[in-house]
Amino acid sequence: MSRREYDEDDIRVRPGRRGSRPRSKDRPAHADATIARVTGVDRGRYTTLVEGPPDRIVLAMKARELGRKGIVVGDQVALVGDASGAPGSLARIVRVEPRASILRRTADDTDPIERAIVANVDQLVVVSALANPEPRPRLIDRCLVAAYDADLDPLLVLTKADLTDPAPFLANYAPLEVPYVVTSSAAGEWAGLDAVRDHLAGRVSVLVGHSGVGKSTLVNALVPDAGRATGAVNDVTGRGRHTSTSAVALQLPVGGWVIDTPGIRSFGLAHVDLDRIIHHFPDLEPGTAECPRGCTHDEPECGLDEWVASGQAGPAGAARLDSLRRLLRARGAQSGD
Ligand SMILES: Nc1nc2c(ncn2[C@@H]2O[C@H](COP(=O)(O)OP(=O)(O)OP(=O)(O)O)[C@@H](O)[C@H]2O)c(=O)[nH]1
Ligand SMILES: [Zn+2]
């Protein structure tokens, strides 16, 4: 982050107008607040970026008046107090602007607590290694459900193509028509990086994926100053060391933002409306035309078995239906039916 680090000269030429104003407790609704974007959250301290030029990084805390309201990476917030970004300064966040989008997940499918991961993103980039660790189709399916549910455009980035032929995996996902990019970075030689850049340029994208799939490696290549720590994949578990500990938003040289998130093992979807889950399986949904009225899609009369058996959902149809039904059952367990 060194390039965007606070620069003393910037502060001197931009003293902020607060100094010349009388302090008053009853100024209406912080009309003079500075708007910033939250780029990182660490133990109650928020790193924010105030757009310039020149941009400046301002450390902030949540004002007491915000109560328990959550603030997540990607949020646009209003800062008051010392928003100079000078060393040792700490601004206060007094308002969170309305969110254009919010990506949530829960710890598991019955967890009542929703965890907002990031706000104001346009695109959910599901990063999966083609090998080491093996792709986890059900985790990918869940990420796609979360993307559709939050109204985000999905993108699949399939890494480590140097280790195996991507064709079999791609054949499975073809019926979904999800845009994808295949990458490899063996020995520092990149393939597919420009294609990823094209998909991210000018947009706000969040990367999610299992630990060790190469998210940090990708982010470091996209944002040369990112300095995201990369970890080796454990040969026994196939898991990476948990090198990234929280979500971090980084500005892309091509314009736009990329938000790296810690590796995940599961993507709980307790917050997704049960009745809507089938709509988030666009390859299967047309097969419900033959379902009996009020079909749960997890019963013997369900039309989806026939749909999949006839090959209309493609080579991964059976796996996708299994994915859907596991998800419905996990959710059903929660509502008790
Ligand atoms: N062979 C090969 N290895 C890769 C590739 N991309 C990343 N790796 C390696 O995979 C390991 C994990 O990469 P990271 O970038 O740390 O993975 P991550 O997804 O950020 O992992 P977490 O921080 O745990 O979320 C590292 O040893 C990388 O060098 C690739 O395209 N091919
Ligand atoms: Zn059905």
Image (cartoon, helix red, strand yellow):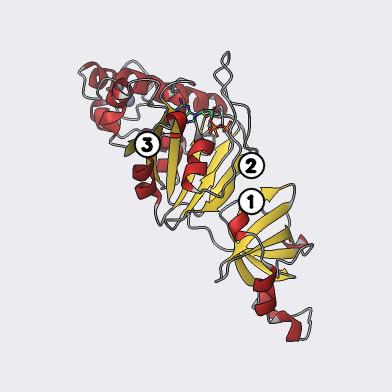
Q: Where residue 40 is drawn, which disc sits there?
A: 1
Residue 25, visible in the rendered structure: yes
Task: Measure the alpha-carbon separation of dots 1 and 3.
Answer: 30 Å
The answer to whether the beta carbon of the residue marked 1 is less than 8 Å from any atom of ligand 1 is no
In terms of sequence position, does the residue under pointer 3 or pointer 2 come before the other?
2
Per the image, label 1 sits on a secondary structure element best described as strand
138 displayed left or right of 195: right
**Picture coordinates of residue 25, whole percent (x, y):** 79, 78
In terms of sequence position, does the residue under pointer 2 or pointer 1 come before the other?
1
At label 3, the amino acid type is: His
- Residue bearing mark 3: 280
Disc 1 versus disc 3: nearer the observer: 1
- Residue bearing mark 2: 246
The correct choice, above or below, for 111 with respect to 133 in the image is below
Q: Residue at x 73, y 57 (%)?
A: 67
Whether label 2 touches label 1, CB < 8 Å: yes
175 displayed left or right of 93: left
Neighbourhood count class around disc 3 (C-alpha, 10 Å): few under 14, some 14–19, many 20 upward:
some
Q: Where residue 271 is drawn, which disc sits there?
A: none
At label 1, the amino acid type is: Gly
At label 2, the amino acid type is: Ser
